[in-house]
Amino acid sequence: MDRDIECSDSLPPISMTANLQIACFSIHYIIEALANGVVRHLKSSLSFVKNICGQEFSAQSVRFRFVESMGTADIITRASLMGKEIEGWNLRLNTAALMPAIALGTSTIAKSETPEEMRAIIRNGLQAGYRHFDTAAVYGTEHLLGEVLKEVLTSGALRREDVFITSKLGLSDAHLDDVIPAIRKSLRELQLDYVDLYMLHFPLRLKRGKNPFQGLSEDSFAPFDLIGVWKALEHSVELGLTRAVGICNSGSKILQQIAADAKMMPAVNQVEMHPGCLQPKLLDTCKQLGTILMAYFPLGSPGNLRLGEGTSLVINSPILKAIAQKHGKTVEQVALRWTLDHGAGFVCKSRNPTRLTQYLGAFGWNLDNEEHKRIETMPRFMLQDWSVWCNATTSPYRTPKEILDDWFDSDEVNVHT
């Protein structure tokens, strides 16, 4: 999508190593662009691409990569349609690794799936074609994902390199000395030698035994050193425990704090993002630092009893319904397409196998500029209540604006709790 986003000149100095990482990331794209010149010899294959993707592509911008997966051959394309880039299934991280843009979530916090229900969701996702799985220590589902992964990897249906596994640091483990033991514990639960992405789940630390989803008080928080924890995460990469590191629930100011002293820039920042919750300034910061934005609640988390009535505002939007009817898509596909059009990936989940397959219909088409402008007129809201993470004495943050400055700088926001 062609959109003008105002760039900020206020980013802090970036360490030499991090600067080199960003430079290498840029060089990778230059090399890839040059390599794509050979595609002019593949014009005869474009009809095949059209049949698979249902789109017309220019020969100069099509890149092929065949992947053996569950006995089928998938085609991954990077193409241009009417002058606009259409991504394939993958996003390129600042490590040069490919990350599937759609991830299957495994959190049971909102809807309390049983272990067997969660195993079924994961198996259904694999069958539908999902190859990116998102878990976390606080979800309590790493072992369930590990069991299903062991089944498919042992059977030979998939290789380890065919799947992308994301996990996240426990909130009580956000301390320099606890990061490495925590990721090793996650790897034991997952029955893996490494994860593809390991993330700081929240930019704060809780005392042992405190559950963030059962209420927080001033006594819940422990001292937190953001830079110390980030250095420990970088060390987990050096030890081969994870291929990349990232953060969650963080605005530009927190990203800039890390950037000023990082050897490795965050590969991903996972935040709430949906058509009612766009943060252009945060998107801009992430693009400048080579950090991919990954959306949770991309559909507004309908049916999430913990978050209340606001969760249906996305799927019940008259604007999204009208756009869906025009394209012959579902409202969910329109909302997910909106996320992809902003260069972000997303985490989704459903107990319904048909719905999991429908989510994949977000790929292979685009919303036009006029449709994006209509979506911008939707009410702005955030589902997470960030005030519970803040206090005047023990939390690192006095107000939600200190966590998500880009969102709370806006005058057009509402928070549904």
Image (tube, helix red, strand yellow):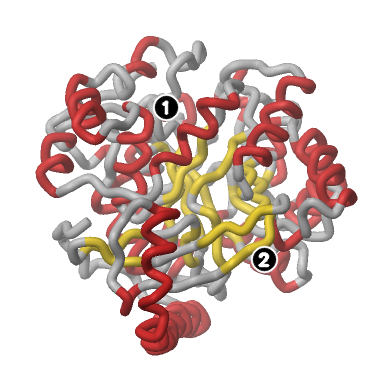
SS class of the residue under badge 1? Answer: loop
Q: Where is residue 169? Give x, y as percent.
A: 67, 46
The residue mark sitting in front, 2 or 1, is: 2
Total count of labels: 2
Residue 275 found in image quarter = top left
Quadrant holding the C terminus: top left
Determine which of the numbered discs, if any, sits on residue 243 in the image: 2
Q: On the image, numbered disc 1 is attached to which residue? A: 384
| Residue 132 visible in the snapshot | yes
Query: 263 left or right of 78?
Result: right
In percent of width and height, residue 28 lies at: 46, 82
Q: Position of residue 301 (x, y in %)?
A: 44, 24
Q: Residue at 59% of width from left, 16% of height from top?
A: 111
**Disc number placed over residue 8 in the picture, else none:** none
Q: Amino acid at mark 2?
A: Arg
Q: What quarter of the picture does the N terminus occupy?
A: bottom left
Q: CA distance from mark 2 to mark 1?
A: 29 Å
Residue at the spot 28% in from the left edge and 45% down from the top edge: 279
Does 388 sit above or below residue 54?
Answer: above
* Residue type at the position of mark 1: Gln
- The image shows residue 407 at horizontal and vertical percentages of 28, 40
For the question of whether residue 33 can be seen, the reply is no
Report whether 329 appears left or right of 201.
Answer: left
- Horizontal placement of 279 versus 132: left or right? left
